[in-house]
Amino acid sequence: MGMAAALPLAARLGVQPLFAGATRPRVAVVGAGAFGGWTALHLLGLGADVTLVDSWGPGNARSSSGGDTRVIRAIYGPDRIYVEMVKRAYALWETMAAGETPTEPLYVETGVLWLLRGDDSYVRSAVPILRELGFPVEKLETADAVRRYPQIDFHGVQAVWFEQRAGALSARRACVAVRDAFTKAGGHYRTASAKPGPIANGSLSGIELGDGSHIEADVYLFACGPWPSESSTGFPTCTVMGSRSRTTRAVNRSIPRAPIAPRRRQAWLARAASSPNGSRSWPRRRWWPPRSVSMRTAPTEI
């Protein structure tokens, strides 16, 4: 598609080009996950000359944005900013997909059934925000939920909420789709480890790649997720921050790798919460499939 595709893409994403011709800044983005990939795509739409680099590829198993399946939902307690981000994410995906050749969907809307054993204030505090921003949410009486979802054991459940606009997201393929849109619009992508060069007079001298090549840019952006420094991870993926950055948490989820049949997606709804905040993620392997769920029956409302 070449650079000619950048302007239509920018228009669809609502991005107004800022740079053109000889004034285009060179930008290097290290990390092709959700943040790095979308940042590179938007910078390209603004007219920058962008190079995107990732050690193992977009959505790889070592990344925060990896995994074959993730849950996307909008209930985040009283934290409005996350709901706004989810709403914008839906809008960006819809506009980017406009005019593209249909493929296997990256998102399957199933809804999320929140089952809470105790106080449901986490969900209740989110309801006004969701309704204001256009996300349907419904509180179900337990008796009604039992009739609607007979395959679920509601023993011990005190509160039931149904979040309609939520479901399963193919995280790995989504990151790949953003990378592909980036390259089709004229961006440059490299799969290689990246190590910043020395800083002289307040400026980074460049980035050394694992294949021995060198990248120079006017601006360097590091979206390294859980790999901000060699000392904290043991992987020399991105060392620019050194001791000035410390990883405080790294999450390693065990997610089913086999393709998930449509009827099995419903099983995800049946994972009862083990904490007061409810069930908000795909089941770990020990939950797959949940014993309390009949795989022969799926709720017709979803």
Image (tube, grey):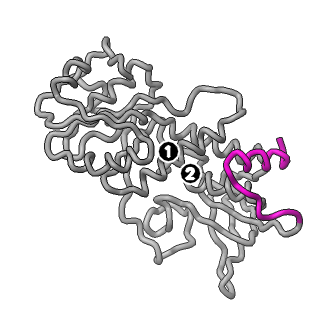
Image location (x, y in percent) of residue 114: 27, 37
* Label 1 Cα crowd, 10 Å radius (few <14 / some 14-19 / many 20+): many
* Residue at which label 2 appears: 33
**Which of the pair 68/126 is nearer the observer?**
126
Image location (x, y in percent) of residue 39: 62, 57
Using the numbered discs, state the Cα–Cα distance from disc 1 to disc 2 in whole angstroms.
Answer: 8 Å
Image location (x, y in percent) of residue 285: 32, 33
Element class at badge 1: loop
**Which of the pair 2/54 is nearer the observer?**
2
Residue appearing at x 51%, y 40% in the figure: 171
Image location (x, y in percent) of residue 67: 47, 40
| Residues at marks 1 and 2 touching, judged by CB atoms closer than 8 Å | yes
What segment is highlighted magenta in the picture? Answer: 1-21
Farthest residue toward the bottom? 201
**Which of the pair 249/140 is nearer the observer?**
140
Residue 38 among magenta residues: no
Task: Classify residue 106 by image quadrant.
Answer: top right
